[in-house]
Structures are given as C-alpha cells and as structure tokens.
Image (cartoon, helix red, strand yellow):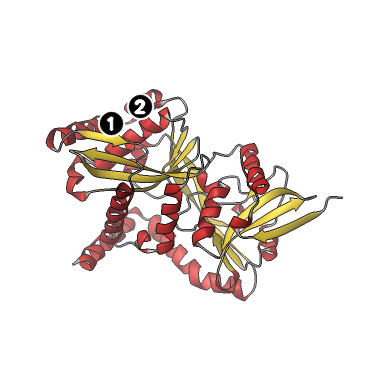
Amino acid sequence: MSDKRMDVVGPGELGADDRKMWRELRTASRAPANPFMDPAFSVAVGLVRPRARVAVLREDGIPVGFFPHERGFAGRGRAIGLGVSDSQGVVLREGVRLDARALLRACALSSWEFDSLEAGQHPFLPHASEALASPVVDLGDGFERYTESLRHRSPGFLKQTLAKERKLARQVGEVRFVYDDPDPGALRALMRWKSAQYRRTGRRDRFAQEWITRLVDLLARSDDPECRGTTSVLYAGGRPVAAHFGLRSPTVLSWWFPAYDRAYGKYSPGLVLLSRILEAAAADGIELVDLGSGPARYKESFKTRDLTVHAGAVVRPGPGGALHRLGREPVRAARRFVRDRPRLARTAARALEELGRLRDR
C-alpha cells in the first residue's frame, strides 16, 4: 500500500526535483505547454503575492500532483495570479483522482475561485458555472499555411491590415518590428498606454496594482525558456506605436497585454502588430498563440479555432464558503446576465467608456 501525503509550501520552496517533476507531468498530460501552468509562473507570483502556495501531492515520496493557489481571508482561495492568469488548474499524474472539496480541506481553504480553468480539469469541472471560448491561432504548419487559411476565411480583413501597414509607412515613416525588444522603455510605454485604455473604458487599471507591475517586471527579466515574458514592439518613423507583452513557453505564446498609441489609431497599429507577431512566432517555433477569453472582434478574425476555459468556484460548507457566495456569486451572475445579452453588453461597454472619459476630465 502506497504512502500518500500532501505538503503545502510557498512556490519558492519548491526544490529543483519538484519543478522538474511538475514539468514532466505537464508534458505527459499532452496539454498545451501554456506558460501560466509552468512552475516558474507560480514562483514569480509567489515573489509578489506572499499568500501564494503550492500543495504538493506525493506517493511514496514522489510528487504526483501540484495545486498552485492563493489563500485569503477566512480561507477564501483563488487561482494563483487570478486576474492576470489565462490558464489555471491542478497538475496531476495520469490516473490520480482527486476530490475537489477534500483537496481544499487539506489546504485549509473554504473556497477556490477560478476564471480560466483549462480543459480536462476533472476535479474542478463539476464546480464550473460557465464555459468561455478562448480563441487560439494554430501555427504548427507554419505562417504561410496560416495566412492561406486566413485569406480564405477573411480575405478583406487581411487585405485591409496590409493596406493599413503600407499607409502607416507612407504617412508616418519606416515601419520596423522587434519581436523580443529588451528596451525597458518600450515596456514602460506599453504600460502607460494600457493604463490609459483601462481608464478610458471604465475598467480597473491593472497596472495601478503594484503586484501586477512587479510580476510583469520579473517575467520580463526572466530567461527561463519554459516561462518568460517577451515584449514585441511596432515602430513607425522611429517611434513606438504599438506593443505587446506576452508570456511564452517554447511552443505556446499567450497574448497578454497589448496596447497602442491612440495618436496612430487610424492605422490600426494593434492589428499590424499582431500580424507581425504571428509571423515571427511561427519562425521561432511557436505552435499556438492563445488569444485568451473575452470578446474582441479582432480575435474572431485572426483565430483558427476556440479552446474552452471555465469560470466558477469550489465552495465548501461553512462560514468561509458562505462568505464567498455572498461576495462573489451576485457579481458573477450579473456578468453572465450581461454577457449572454449582446445588446445589453454593448450598452454596458458604452457606459463604461463614458465613465472613463468623465474620470479623465
């Protein structure tokens, strides 16, 4: 009979053998090598979120599972990096079965909230309250094959994007693209543009939260090939006009923080940038670009298919679970109500934009 135990540790306390086993389990699962599911992401979050934890499940001393999470007031748990993480869940050896509530009890959690639970997460799927489409771009067959498909599906869109790039070069100056720009000034410009976009659209400014800014800085400086940040920049006339900070593994690039200078908005620099990134990523061995859940017209134009991610929460009986329901369920229900009604969603988006304009006056 095997000896089973579970240790709950800070991400930085994981040993080299633990991190190696984590990656081996991910590879064996045949799931996409999403960098958010790599131990390096959890370690980086642990450096900026002191209540980050990882439950390590062992059989006869050998790790067979890893459950990264954060623990808040009254044991309210959340996916590690919730709010910026685009792929969440537990990493398990094939054949290992878990009961979600028993796992939470062992971690001293009263609830565990997720908003981008990856497919195949059997312990948590019964607790999902909604399924969300997450558009992706498949580049495994190369960029030329992808553009052939795009030209067939959206000929007008591709032609317009190329025309905008030519117009940008003609009216602003030479267009130059850097796939992995080490200049910290480019990342700072991106953060300014993105903060302005959040305020303009009436949404919470993520870069006003210190832990997110610190996390991005840490990942931007990382040289870990399994999980590192990359800043891609589109220049015109010698100045940056659009940029994207993403997280990548050797085969998956996660579309994370895109933004552009509104002064050049008529040239659609964000679309030009994404097109250039896809070409460079394919040449760099990236097989999948995950555009992330959330509605956006450009994602529908660029995507090749959708993955499914899930939002919801595991809630244990008791005061902590009741506290979670009181605090989160009405908000989540309201979001679902709006999202399922496109006309209402458009009205809500316009109201948020107006609120943002008033805030900036």
Q: Report if the CB atoms under discs 2 and 1 are less than 8 Å apart.
A: yes
The foreground one among 71 and 51 is 51
SS under mark 1: helix
**On the image, which quarter does residue 180 sit in?**
top left
Residue 227 image point, x, y percent: 50, 44
Circle 1 residue: 158
**On the image, which quarter does residue 341 sit in?**
bottom left
Residue 157 image point, x, y percent: 27, 33
| Label 1 neighbour load within 10 Å: few <14, some 14-19, many 20+ | many
Circle 1: residue type: Leu
Residue 339 image point, x, y percent: 39, 56
User: In the image, is residue 70 above or below residue 159?
Assistant: below
| Label 2 neighbour load within 10 Å: few <14, some 14-19, many 20+ | some
Number of numbered discs overlaid on the protein picture: 2
Residue at point 28%, 31% (across, down): 158
SS under mark 2: helix
Residue at the left extreme, as displayed:
171
Residue at the right extreme, as displayed:
1
Q: Is residue 321 left or right of residue 207?
A: right
Residue at point 33%, 38% (across, down): 274
Residue at point 19%, 33% (across, down): 174
Residue 124: tell me if it is visible. yes
Circle 2: residue type: Thr
Residue 117: tell me if it is visible. no
Cα gap from disc 2 to disc 1, whole angstroms: 8 Å
Circle 2 residue: 147
Residue 130 image point, x, y percent: 50, 54
Numbered circle sitting on residue 335: none
User: In the image, is residue 358 above or below residue 65?
Assistant: below
**Reading the chain from its start, which is encountered first: label 2 or label 1?**
2
